[in-house]
Amino acid sequence: MDKLKMHSVNLTEEHIRKIRDLFPGCVTETKDENGNLKLAVDFDLLKQELSDSIVDGPQERYHLNWPGKREALLTANAPIAKTLRPCREESVDFETTQNLFIEGDNLDALKLLQETYLGKVKMIYIDPPYNTGNDFIYEDDFAVDKSEYELASGVRDEHGNKQFEEDRWKQNSAAKGRFHSDWLSMMYPRLKLARNLLREDGVMFISIDDGEVAQLRKMCDEVFGEGNFVAQLVWERAFSPKNDAKFISNSHDYVLMFAKSILDFTIGRLKRTAEADRRYTNPDNDPRGPWSSSDISVKTYSAANDYPIDAPSGKIIEPPAGRCWSLSKKAFLERLEDNRIWFGPNGDNVPRIKRFLSEIREGMTPTSILLYKEVGHSQEGSQEVKKLLGDQGVFDGPKPVRLLRRLLTIANTDKDALILDFFAGSSTTAHAVMQLNAEDGGNRKFIMVQLPEPCDEKSEAFRAGYQNIAEISKERIRRAGKKIKDEKGASSLDTGFRVLKVDSSNMAEVYYTPDAVKQEMLFDNVDNIKPDRTPEDLLFQILLDWGVELTLPIRREPMHGKTVFFVDQNALAACFDTGITEELVKDLAAYQPLRVVFRDNGFDSDALKINVEQIFRQLSPETEVKTI
């Protein structure tokens, strides 16, 4: 039961709400002096609404803006002191796989991947939270949940009691306004960072529903450039209406498609189907085989193309009213001579041009409608997860593999392409990549990124033994990979993945004021590496810092009682042990690695530490030497 408000009404808020009822476009969001969002009137727009002539005001420009946009941009550009730590026990084929599974906040992951994978990703697909009013999982500094917003905006007091009543439209609008801002602020830095990773011929797909598609389209126009918009695909996700829908039973979602550079991107064509080929027949037994015909008249008028045509029956045929022929008379006669003009079975129809199946480009141009009969529906996606994991309801709303297969085709992914999904969910994208590789012999690689979002203790997933969504995602890849190998007999197919987890930097950040430092502490602080970090943890941070691919083969070799890591043969060598001798340094230099890394306090003497670079200059002058 709601309590009485026990205070007088806020007349300013009431007035703003009344203005919003009459002129909704004149009420927007702003921040008060404490940084809290509130409704405010755009008086310039309101004056224009109440005037029958143009009212002078600030210079207009078309742009997307929201409270928190500057902070979101700052977040995208701000550096982080984090790393990726390998987790061999959760990986599959750690030593040989070229696939990655990154567990952690995708904003951190995208930042960590910038150096290594800049301009290397052919296709990105994401299925982000649809902003339905549920709590945010990716809570950046500017994101709040609904209850926090209602408390901050005064809709409810600290006890959860409503402070004022709103009708349905107002209530949804107030809540949605805040959630628009939070959702946009969550997506903006991630999209900006993701674009950097795309190849020049790369493309990004984003699944979204009606709730945010308009805002997302504007945001992508800004991030990618309006000219790089490819399509707004419509996916038919449901095959039957929901009878309990309040107004319209929504049976579709959208997939926005943007290219990194529309000039460099080439659309992938779909395999021809028997249904498509049935449109091609051969009623005149043309030796070139089946053909279909198309109209040769056009609306764009040209006097040169307005001429009469003599049909085989003797009938004189003029262009339809207001139209002309698409061919000049010379071009028409050439095609007539080549038996490429069809006048119908009786020889007296309006002429049409013949297009032969044998001459058309291989494959079909994709359409903007993704029919469930061709790419699957949401229930199919759920059934796929159930068959693999054996539990119903383990993951809500997974996309069907056929949908991702279609997007991989449209993206024109070459057989060595790198595919990224940084809202991995149940890892349908990884499943689709492995399946496509099994079918066409490709070697496409994937990078999945998923936050270890805890499973609700009342959920089917928790009862099935999954602690978080990332566990579901990894297990789906394991089982899908095994299933594909068994069914396709593709024993050499790469269905593995290296698990890397976002964590704080391996380097300790401990600072003391000069008067707080004691003599015995001087030697304690020589080693700036955190005590819980392994040599392999250090190696992967080195790979990130140097921009070396995270899936390159790694081998360990004993050398003078120490362990030396070699990455991609001799691309990089590293030894993080202490007590390194001059003999080890000289033997390592004999391998002539491109880069070599030691622990800063790893040498058995200060003299050796000073002379290491000199040794490499003599024995391996091309080697770049660094310490951590």
Image (cartoon, grey):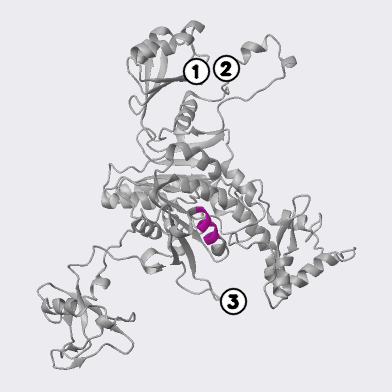
- Magenta highlight range: 216-223
Rendered image quadrant of residue 519? top right
Residue 83, placed above or below residue 434 = above
Q: CA distance from mark 2 to mark 1?
A: 9 Å
Label 1 amino acid?
Answer: Arg
**Gap between marks 3 and 2, in whole Å?**
65 Å
Residue carrying label 1: 599
Image quarter of the N terminus: bottom right
- For mark 3, give the secondary structure: loop
Q: Which residue is mark 2?
A: 527
Mark 1 Cα shell of 10 Å, populated few (<14), some (14-19), many (≥20): many
Image disc number at residue 247: 3
| Residue at 77%, 72% in the rendered image | 18
Q: Position of residue 590 (x, y in %)?
A: 32, 14
Q: Is residue 220 magenta?
A: yes
In the rendered image, is residue 105 in sight? no
